[in-house]
């Protein structure tokens, strides 16, 4: 039986696409190679968000070629698209896919007759990602992705609904909708729902929320302006099905920095939208990304970011130190911020984020939680670890029979960055 290995770098979309290819290879009769076993086929899904992603992608390809000298290596992903000639020339590379739309064709060329339209499982994970959209045209000054994934593609509503059923039937209790620019779902579709109009993200979420099955739905990253009143109404109307958690990329709280980033909002517009969402939903978890040390960022700009973050009260902040990305406008901007300043600002914002996270968790104490139980606690016998619908890590007492289930419990205390459940709520 032929064997294969997969290696994935980068985002949820990449992870979904690797899983799609993995499932197709299994249908073809391939078996996943064990640790230390040489493979006949290797798949590397690359990332180019940062220059380090390119370096890591090339290093992994060389390692696979060295450790699997007879293997055919297939490379896909954004790093391969950005530097196709360079990647194609690496040792062992037999094929390079520069467009993820070619994945079904690849499986067909390998001999698969019944090419799947999506995934059925997501490995051993208890949550499954479902890719519904590809492509971005936002042209933010720091981002290379619109260069390598410029084509907008949305999957038809019916195809997405059919796919959601499959991982749910295989026991996945959380479905995460993902895309390169999820909020642009539907802009390239010409017909569907609502009747006579073009389907959009709200339409898709509403249709999934109405489905039968024991599962919950989570949305990946959105622009704040894309959280429309209609979408808020759907979240509010299905609190046990659609997680009250939104990841809204802020990037900076300074208008001057936002303009240089080529973002399409002011700080007050972003803060105002987050506050409206907070008032419209029941204690939603709002998480975000922030870049510190963008070219020209002053101490006043950084303080404005900290003030905006505190006013919103994010439950988690992903802090990134700006790194110039060749091929983007930001790489050539003047007034590059020294590395030491970026490290200090990242540390300060990280500490503020931890304080806000604990404050958010404390605000949930005494309230019911819906928890996806995922694994035994590695350090404490009799405790399990999972994730609440508000994206909080939770530890609770119970046996391994609860793993993979959605359970209801009460938030009791905050311990070591987690919420400890006070007790389960009977089903």
Image: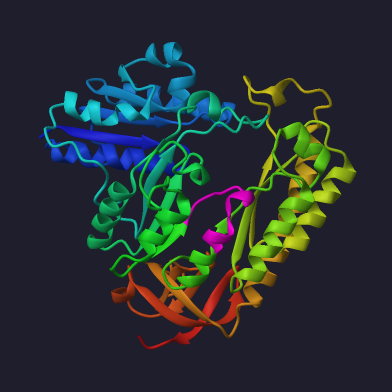
Vertical side of 91 occupied by 249: above or below:
below
Would residue 2 appear left or right of 154 to someone viewing this image?
left
Would residue 314 appear left or right of 367 to someone viewing this image?
right
- The spot of residue 317 in percent (x, y) is 65, 54
Would residue 250 appear left or right of 68 to someone viewing this image?
right
Q: Determine which quarter of the picture holds residue 357.
A: bottom right
Along the line of sight, the residue nearer the viewer: 267 or 401: 267
Quadrant in which the N terminus is drawn:
top left
Q: Does the magenta stretch include residue 231?
A: yes
Q: Which residue is drawn at 53% across and 60% down?
A: 230
Q: Can residue 32 be seen in this view?
A: no
Along the line of sight, the residue nearer the viewer: 293 or 268: 268
Q: Give the range drawn in magenta.
A: 219-232
Q: Is residue 320 visible?
A: yes
- The spot of residue 424 in percent (x, y) is 43, 85
- The spot of residue 23 in percent (x, y) is 22, 42
Q: Determine which quarter of the picture holds residue 311.
A: bottom right
Q: Which residue is drawn at 11% across and 32% down?
A: 113
Q: Which residue is drawn at 29% across and 23% down?
A: 73
Quadrant in which the C terminus is drawn:
bottom left
């Amino acid at each position: 039986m032929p064997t294969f290995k997969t290696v994935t770098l980068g985002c949820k979309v990449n992870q979904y696409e690797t899983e799609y290819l993995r499932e197709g290879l299994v249908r073809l009769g391939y078996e996943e190679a064990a640790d230390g076993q040489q493979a006949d086929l290797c798949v590397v899904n690359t990332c180019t968000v940062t220059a380090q992603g390119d370096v890591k992608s090339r290093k992994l390809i060389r390692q696979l070629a060295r450790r699997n000298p007879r293997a055919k290596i297939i490379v896909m992903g954004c790093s391969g698209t950005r530097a196709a000639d360079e990647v194609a020339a690496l040792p062992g590379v037999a094929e390079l896919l520069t467009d993820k739309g070619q994945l079904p064709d690849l499986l067909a060329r390998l001999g698969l007759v019944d090419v799947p339209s999506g995934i059925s499982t997501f490995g051993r994970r208890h949550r499954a990602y479902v890719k519904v959209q590809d492509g971005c045209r936002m042209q933010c000054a720091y981002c290379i992705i619109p260069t390598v994934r410029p084509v907008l593609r949305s999957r038809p509503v019916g195809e997405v609904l059919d796919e959601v059923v499959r991982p749910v039937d295989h026991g996945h209790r959380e479905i995460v909708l993902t895309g390169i620019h999820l909020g642009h779902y539907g802009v390239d579709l010409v017909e569907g729902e609502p009747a006579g109009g073009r389907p959009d993200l709200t339409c898709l979420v509403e249709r999934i929320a109405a489905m039968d099955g024991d599962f919950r739905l989570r949305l990946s990253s959105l622009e704040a302006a894309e959280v429309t009143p209609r979408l808020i109404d759907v979240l509010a109307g299905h609190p046990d099905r659609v997680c009250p958690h939104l990841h809204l990329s802020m990037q900076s709280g300074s208008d001057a920095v936002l303009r240089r980033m080529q973002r399409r909002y002011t700080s007050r517009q972003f803060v105002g939208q987050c506050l409206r969402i907070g008032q419209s939903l029941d204690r939603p978890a709002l998480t975000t990304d922030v870049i510190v040390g963008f070219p020209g960022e002053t101490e006043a700009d950084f303080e404005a970011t900290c003030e905006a973050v505190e006013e919103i009260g994010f439950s988690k902040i992903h802090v990134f130190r700006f790194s110039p990305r060749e091929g983007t406008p930001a790489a050539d901007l003047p007034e590059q911020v020294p590395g030491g300043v970026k490290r200090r600002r990242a540390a300060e914002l990280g500490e503020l984020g931890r304080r806000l996270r604990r404050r958010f968790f404390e605000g949930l104490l005494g309230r019911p939680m819906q928890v996806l139980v995922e694994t035994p606690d590695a350090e404490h016998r009799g405790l399990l670890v999972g994730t609440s619908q508000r994206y909080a890590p939770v530890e609770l007492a119970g046996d391994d029979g609860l793993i993979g289930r959605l359970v209801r419990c009460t938030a009791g205390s905050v311990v070591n960055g987690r919420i400890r459940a006070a007790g389960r709520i009977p089903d």
